[in-house]
Amino acid sequence: QVKLVESGGGSVETGGSLTLSCVLSGWMYSGYCMGWFRQAPGSEREGVAGIYTGSGAEYYADSVKGRFTMSRDNAKKTMYLQMNNLKPEDSAMYYCATDPGPAEGGCMQAMRTAGGRLGYWGQGTQVTVSS
């Protein structure tokens, strides 16, 4: 049974930093799509950062480039999202998601289109940035 558990959310002031973690259990695939998404109240879900592990191809939303960095610890089966210089517009529920189905192209498309093709999701962790 695949399970994803996010942690690390919280409340910070503008310009602050947070690191989100996503622990993946029950996984047996070597190449898969994995990413971070966020959804604010009244807004559509959007892809923030993602990776296709088979090739290493990465995706970052334009709004977070230069501020957010995604990384992985394969031994710990954990994915991280380092978020620096946070802005109020970054406030949202953040989710990690994964799926072995999409290849690189499908993975990047999933990141651009809110992850509808990804079948496994965590419960989310809240990030609130105050001005």
Image (cartoon, grey):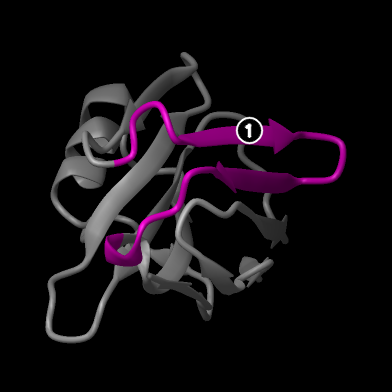
Side (left or right) of 75 relative to 55 = right
**Is residue 72 inside the magenta stretch?**
yes
Q: Which residue is mark 1?
A: 71
Image vertical order of residue 65 relative to residue 76, above or below: above
Q: Quadrant of residue 16?
A: bottom right
131 vs 116, nearest the viewer: 131
**Is residue 128 inside the magenta stretch?**
no
Residue furthest to the bottom in view is 41
Residue furthest to the top in view is 55
- Residue 124 x %, y %: 50, 76
- Residue 75 x %, y %: 86, 36
- State the extent of the magenta-drawn residues as a range: 64-89
Q: Secondary structure at mark 1?
A: strand
Residue located 32% across and 24% down the image: 104
5 vs 17, nearest the viewer: 17
Where's the N terminus, which quadrant?
A: bottom right
Q: Amino acid at mark 1?
A: Ser
Side (left or right) of 72 relative to 15 = right
Where's the C terminus, which quadrant?
A: bottom left
- Residue 89 x %, y %: 27, 63
Image vertical order of residue 119 relative to residue 48, above or below: below
The answer, for residue 84, to whether it is visible in the render is yes
Residue located 25% across and 32% down the image: 108
